[in-house]
Image (cartoon, rainbow, N blue to C red):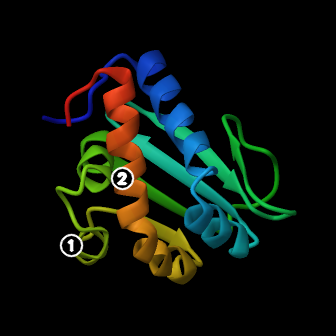
Amino acid sequence: MGFPYQDPQQAKQFVLEFANRLKDVKEIYEGWSALKMLIGIHIKQPDIDFWVDARGEGMQICETHPGGEEGASLTLTADLFHKLYTGQENAMLAFTKRLIQPKGKVSGIMQLTRTMPQAVEAYKKFLAEKGVQA
């Protein structure tokens, strides 16, 4: 099964709610916060953009561009997003196969692939809460 929503509004709400949930996962929150930059996440098919703002204390998930230059950005399809977070696709392999298009200073972001097991667990729990099958 691919990404669960094709309607752009439903998809955006789903992704933003999940991204905000990741702030509650200690390893993920600490890892993203340590990057100290603005990271753009650009999902395609349907199109969803959000930003992880870690320029200050901690990290914030922003639905609209908070201003300033993106230190790094990642572009990927919604189906790949879903496959990554259900554990069906390996993040490092997705980078090497160029399924994720990175820009800027992405070395730190790539290092965060070590937190993928926690993110996969959080996503599967989120899907279950939403009544969506992985």
**Between disc 2 and disc 1, whose residue precedes?**
1
Residue at 55% across, 50% down = 22
In the visual, does 110 lie left or right of 60? left
Residue holding disc 1: 97
Residue at (52, 83) in percent of width and height = 107
Residues marked 2 and 1 touching at CB (< 8 Å): no
Q: Is residue 127 above or below residue 73?
A: above
Quarter in which the N terminus is drawn: top left
Q: Which residue is mark 2?
A: 121
Distance between the alpha carbons at the discs numbered 2 and 1 = 24 Å
Q: Which amino acid is tagged 2?
A: Glu
**Side (left or right) of 98 relative to 34:** left
Image location of residue 112, percent across then percent down: 49, 74
- On the image, the x and y values in percent for residue 114 come to 42, 77
Q: Is residue 65 above or below residue 99?
A: above
Q: Find residue 118 and report its horizontal and vertical position in percent.
A: 42, 61
Residue at the spot 37% in from the left edge and 39% down from the top edge: 125
